Image: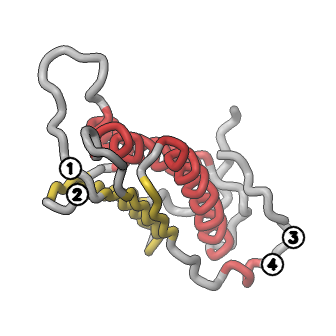
Amino acid sequence: MARSSRRRDREPEDFVTPHVPLDLAAQADPPRVGAFRRALKRWLAEALEARQAAAGQPLDLPDEVADVAEDLVLATSEALENIVDHAFAGVAAPGTMMLRADLVEDVVTIVVADDGHWRAPQTGPTMRGRGLTLMQNLAGAMVEHARGGTTVTMRRLLPEPAHDRPRAQA
């Protein structure tokens, strides 16, 4: 995961304040998927750096934590792309997609929701249809369908902050 562009000369007590959850909503169109993905990536970097600082660790994320963050961003992007591709098919204008992310007690929870209509995955051979499996494998995704839309909830427990462990060589 790329380093945050913010200054690194902050004191650890600057990170003691709990972070603010990420809460986004917008029309479900393709450019918004990229904007939401970038916002989540920035939010995760800041929340995870704050976690490192609170543990008295360097702000650079250990590889295990950076890998979890990348998995979450990929799974979230897939959920958002599914909304754009499927939730509003056959309607004149797309509805709303929402993204909420929070970090509480070493568990990152991400919720992606829409106010569209669920379309069951196609059966039989196809080049598509692996998104739900991807989200489940990367982030333990649970999908709920209701009349008012679909909600995907993903949760990942973060590895404990490293204490004087050597980092893997790339």
Q: Amino acid at mark 3?
A: Asp
Label number found at residue 117:
1
Residues at marks 3 and 2, CA–CA distance in whole angstroms: 44 Å
Q: Nearer the viewer, mark 3 or mark 2?
A: 2
- Badges 2 and 4: C-beta atoms under 8 Å apart? no
Check residue 9 in the rendering and tell me which mark sits there, or answer none.
3
Number of other residues with Cα within 10 Å of mark 4, as a class: few under 14, some 14 to 19, many 20 or more: few
Q: Earlier in the sequence, mark 3 or mark 1?
A: 3
Pick whichever, 56 or 111, lies toward us: 111
Whether the residues at callouts 1 and 2 have beta carbons within 8 Å, the answer is yes
In the rendered image, the quadrant that contains the C terminus is: top right
Q: CA distance from mark 2 to mark 4?
A: 44 Å
Q: Earlier in the sequence, mark 3 or mark 2?
A: 3
Marks 3/1 in contact by CB < 8 Å: the verdict is: no
Lateral position of residue 129 relative to residue 31, left or right: left
Label located before the other in sequence (1 or 4)? 4
* Residue 71, position as x, y percentages in the image: 47, 44
Q: Tell me the CA gap for discs 1 and 4.
A: 47 Å
State the separation of the CA atoms marked 4 and 3. Answer: 7 Å
The structure residue drawn at horizontal position 35% and vertical position 55%, both measured from the top left corner, is 95
**Which quadrant of the view contains residue 133?**
top left
Residue 136 vs 26, above or below: the answer is above
Question: Which numbered disc flags the more N-terminal residue, 2 or 4?
Answer: 4
Q: Mark 2 sits on what residue?
A: 149
SS class, disc 1: loop
Q: Residue furthest front?
A: 92
Circle 2 packing at 10 Å, graded few (<14), some (14-19), many (20+), is some
